[in-house]
Amino acid sequence: MSNLDRQAALTVCGGRGFVVAEPVRELLSPRHVQLGESTEVRRLLPNLGRRMVGAWAFVDHYGPDDIADEPGMQVPPHPHMGLQTVSWLHDGEVLHRDSTGSLQTIRPRELGLMTSGRAISHSEESPEPHARFLHGAQLWVALPDAHRHVEPHFQHHADLPRITAPGLTATVILGELDGAASPGTTYTPIVGADLALTAGTETNLPLDPDFEYAVLAMSGEAHVDGVPVLPGSMLYLGCGRTELPLRAASDAGLMLLGGEPFEEEIVMWWNFVGRTDEEIRTAREQWMTGDRFGEVKGYDGGPLPAPELPATHIKARGRVR
């Protein structure tokens, strides 16, 4: 999914100076962003005061939207570099196309994982005909410097490992949780999991104390470490936890995001992750005038133009020692 913000700002993210080294309960409110004609997203990362969670650098939550009489998601071809996109649905379908030739319909609880590496472009759209409701999350994972120029590729995994406990089903999207490992390719120690809780459930989820964590509320009414988290909001939890208390007042859906704090500082703008704004400016120019990002074939429409870059020049400081 694209960042369609036409006022996109150059943002420095990452680095251990932004990490809270102890358990906290920091509730993040979303910023509402229009995505195409009929889809509004709630943007949780980057957020004022909280830029990343581990390598997770971008989180959008959308729906549930009734799109029975609407076009649904319609995101024209657009570029990415230096990151992975994670598509995750609770309702509906999304048709993915990219410049490597991938063509895949992503359905609920299936992993669509696109590694942009040095450069890729893709489009996303609700197929026609499509289901009545669309509900999901789109997330980005920043690639570390050693792997951010890998060859672009796309993975689709319909069968993911699950952990079950009374009243809880946890689907491991990326990384490893309680001994269950996702088949999705990762480049840093990370975890992403979809948590489905039945009403009345009280349980503790095992965590890695070296990871920082956050929980995104997808649906229902749940309390995370005693804090009520409403759909479309996210609770940042810091580091140092060995378990996470969960309680569901109704059937509820959550996403657990975590990982080792991302040591490198990055520069993020529009749909690019780099290390300097010179690198970002070059990528923008190559998207507008060159062929670095390839061509998305089969999409009915033209590519998305890049917004104007701000005049401000910034750069990341590199690896924090």
Image: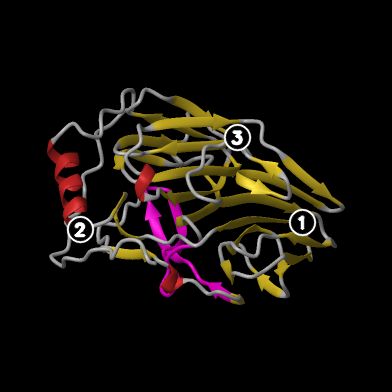
**Secondary structure type for disc 2:** helix
The answer to whether one can see residue 58 in this image is: no
Q: Position of residue 15 (x, y in %)?
A: 40, 66
Tag 1 residue: 251
Tag 2 residue: 277
Q: Position of residue 273 (x, y in %)?
A: 32, 52
Sooner in the amino-acid sequence: mark 3 or mark 1 = 3
The answer to whether one can see residue 286 in this image is: yes
Q: Residue at x 81, y 55 (%)?
A: 198
* Disc 3 crowd, CA 10 A, few/some/many (<14, 14-19, 20+): some
* Disc 2 crowd, CA 10 A, few/some/many (<14, 14-19, 20+): many
Compared to 240, does 134 lie above or below?
above
The total of numbered circles placed on residues is 3
Magenta highlight range = 26-53
Sooner in the amino-acid sequence: mark 2 or mark 3 = 3
| Residue type for callout 2 | Asp
